[in-house]
Every structure is written in structure tokens, then in C-alpha cells.
Image (cartoon, rainbow, N blue to C red):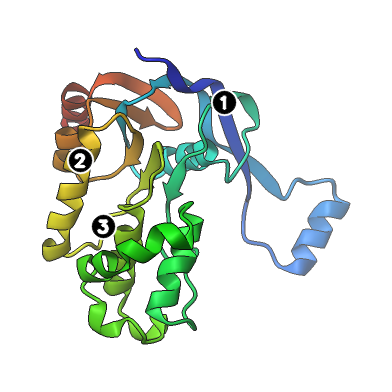
Amino acid sequence: MNEPLLRAENLAKRYRVLKRQRSTLRALKALCGGQKLTAESWALRDVSFAVGRGEKVAVVGRNGSGKTTLLRLVAGIIQPNGGRLDVAVEPLALFKFWIGQNADLPVIDNVFLFGAVCGMKRRQLRPLLAHILDAAAVTHLAYAPLRDLSLGQRQRLALSIVFQAPADFLVFDETFVHVDQAFFRECNAFFVRLAESPRTMLIASHDHAFLTRYCQRAIWLDQGRVRCDGPAAEVIAAYESES
């Protein structure tokens, strides 16, 4: 493996969830009676792996297996309850593409706003502006309020900006679920370039053909634990055989 960019050792994350639906009165009675209102739910337990610089790694698993929790830990959005996580380079993480957008501002202003979220300055974005709008197919809406765009148009705009970001470490979580077929060609072109670059990627998706095409390695999470870690095609085939 190349020099580790990311290392997790016995990583653990738990949440507290309500044990049952309670009214305020029932909650007070339970507290007075010494009953616990919540129970522990472990999203991740004893997760250990490392990602080398330049690796493209897929994360697969059923819904609720801990994929998003793991990526949020890597992105620094949440903190672990146990174990150790070392990330050498802050990643550019894309979870909900509307985070960092402002529906009241024009589309063109949102390019600069979301671009700043992606680590780009105005001077970097200005020469790319026409290309970003064209790639997202929203050039004719450049001065319209962002709220006038459809959800799909807003997603295309966000991705078109991300595709221009210079980040060395990228994290994607089910980012391409609603992408239309026309824009998917733009996505494929980006990932072809990414696959040939020294940049690092960690991506969770249910599109296994996409993951196999662009990732050399996959980590299979099962009930919050690493079930398998190895070549992407082999791990994904093993996962599909049990799904």
C-alpha cells in the first residue's frame, strides 16, 4: 500500500435511540422510576482499515450497515466513541448536495458560494464559470434564483462545481442517485480522469457496476463491522451473492 492517507483502528460509533414511543407524562414516570428512556445503538464497532494515497475505495453494504456513519467520521462531521481515526488530508466530502447552497441567491452567485465550500476562491472559479453552467445545463438560468431550479438541476450544478475542485481527497455518499442519463456522461468523464490521477477517493454507492469500474478496492460493512476488504470486483461479487 502507498503511504496511508487514512487509518482507522478499532473505530466505533454509537447513538442513543428511544426504546419506545413515549408521551411526556410517560417519560416523567419512567425517569422517576429509574427506567432508561434510551438504548445504545452501535453504528460501527471495531472497524480497522487504512487507505493509501491515490487509492479509490468503495464502501458497500446494506442500508443501516454503517456506510454513511463511516464517511461522516472520515469527513470530521461526527466524532467516534471509541478507537482511533487519523486523516492526513481534510477531504472534500459531498453528502447532501444542497448543503452550501442558498435558494434565495441567483444561480451564478451559488457557483461562487458552493465553490467556496469546495475550497475554491472566486479568482479560480471565474474562468470556469461558463463551463460549470454549461455542464450543468443551466446557462439560461444563470441569473434566476436557485429555488426556481428543479432538484435535478441543483444536483447537476453542485456536481459540476465539485468536478472542478482541486481537492486531493474526495468522499462521496450516494451522490449520483438522481443523476439523469445525459449528465451521467459528464460524471463518467470526471471519474475516468479521477481514476487516472493520484487523488484519493472513498465512495459509497449501491451502483456496483459504477464502483467496480472506478475503484480498485472495496470494503464491505455488515452490521457496523468490516465483513470483507479486498479487490473491488471480488468483494462486491461476494456481497451480491448474499444480498
The residue sitting at 14% across, 35% down in the picture is: 213
- The tag on residue 85 is 1
Q: Are marks 2 and 1 in contact (CB under 8 Å)?
A: no
- Could you say whether the residue bearing mark 2 is in a helix, strand or loop? helix
Amino acid type, mark 1: Leu
Residue pointed to by mark 3: 177
Quarter of the picture holding the N terminus = top left
Residue count near mark 3 (Cα–Cα under 10 Å), binned few <14, some 14–19, many ≥20: few
The residue sitting at 38% across, 45% down in the picture is: 166
- Vertically, is 221 above or below 67? above
Quarter of the picture holding the C terminus = top left
Query: Viewer-proximal residue, 16 or 210?
Result: 210
- Distance from the alpha carbon under mark 3 to that under mark 1: 28 Å
Give the farthest residue toward the top. 1
Amino acid type, mark 2: Arg
Residue count near mark 2 (Cα–Cα under 10 Å), binned few <14, some 14–19, many ≥20: few
- The tag on residue 193 is 2
Q: Tally the marks.
A: 3
- Distance from the alpha carbon under mark 2 to that under mark 1: 29 Å
- Distance from the alpha carbon under mark 3 to that under mark 2: 21 Å
Image coordinates of residue 9 in percent, x first then y, are: 54, 18
Image coordinates of residue 139 in percent, x first then y, are: 25, 78
Marks 3 and 2: which is nearer the front?
A: 2
